[in-house]
Amino acid sequence: MLETDNYEKFKKDILTLAKIDLNAYKEKQMRRRINTLITKNEIKTYDEYVALLRKDKEKFEQFINFLTINVSEFYRNPEQWKILENEIFPKLISRFGKNLKIWSAACSTGDEPYSLVMALSRLVPLNSIRIIATDIDKQVIDTARMGLYSEKSVVAVPEDLKKKYFTRVGGSYQISGEIKSRVEFKEHDLLKDSYPTGCHLIVCRNVVIYFTEDAKDAIYSKFYKSLVPGGSLFIGSTEQIMNYRDIGFVRNKSFFFERGT
């Protein structure tokens, strides 16, 4: 049984050690997840676990990976990708040209930025596509760079794109180098790192739901500042921006918001 009486100290220790502010996450849910991991490592107290994280790089990376909510698949919610491909992309291209600056924030294992490249490749040449893809978790970025996915991950990829850009390797699918080369992966913490500027499109889906209301407001406000006037933000089907007008966004479609011009 885990002794859970000093979680406040644990949060401070993690802020010092990993530069991650656990106060920004919904406490009940996050505490339950962390307690599960600590118990799995057969440790009795938070202090012991912090000591382990300090000395064991592998356990530290396991912790960061465990904190990250990785539910990812190509073309997740396909009907929203159709709106992106048929309405949002053409509008952005007509406004800003074919060299769009696109940021996939909290990109997880790369499914989302690679989906963006493939969807955009129907409209502009591959060599004009540039996606910045960021995540707090080094392990998922390494997985993304490798570009090997399960059959389940690629089930929603349109057949023509699957045929063109994936190679079957046993029971898995390897994405092509020409798609991978259009994405630049970087480590990034949405809560504390500076944001890219001059973006025409920001995609951040099904991640912000795990943060407190104050953290959400801060993130959406920073996204607004990262976009050029007329740029778009694409959020997840589980998310809402209740105060989007206060921030300055105009609602375009259910999950698409535009920075006012």
Image: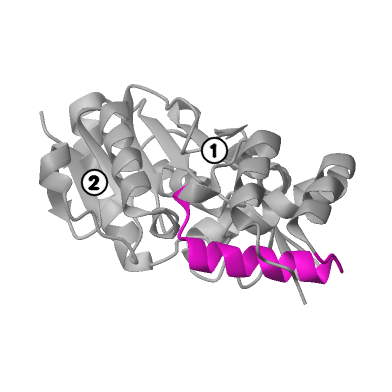
User: Can the viewer see residue 67?
Assistant: yes
Q: In this rendered view, identify the residue nearer to me: 201 or 57.
A: 57
- Amino acid on which disc 2 is placed: Ile
Percent coordinates x, y for residue 105 in the rendering: 46, 42
Most extreme residue toward the bottom, as rendered?
1
Residue shown at 66%/34% (left/top)? 16
* Quadrant into which the N terminus falls: bottom right
User: Can the viewer see residue 71?
Assistant: no
Residue shown at 83%/51% (left/top)? 59
- Amino acid on which disc 1 is placed: Thr
Q: In this rendered view, identify the residue nearer to me: 16 or 110.
A: 16
Tell me how the rendering is colored: one colour
Residue shown at 45%/55% (left/top)? 207
* Residue indicated by mark 1: 134
Judge whether 94 appears above or below 197 on screen.
below
> Disc 2 vs disc 1: Cβ atoms closer than 8 Å?
no
Q: Crowding near pointer 1: few (<14 within 10 Å), some, many (20+)?
A: many
Percent coordinates x, y for residue 26 in the rendering: 45, 60
Per the image, label 2 sits on a secondary structure element best described as helix
In this view, the mark in front (2 or 1): 1
Most extreme residue toward the front, as rendered?
5
Q: CA distance from mark 2 to mark 1?
A: 22 Å
Per the image, label 1 sits on a secondary structure element best described as strand
* Residue indicated by mark 2: 88
Specify the principal SS of the magenta part: helix
Q: Which residues are magenta?
A: 24-44
Percent coordinates x, y for residue 172 in the rendering: 73, 65
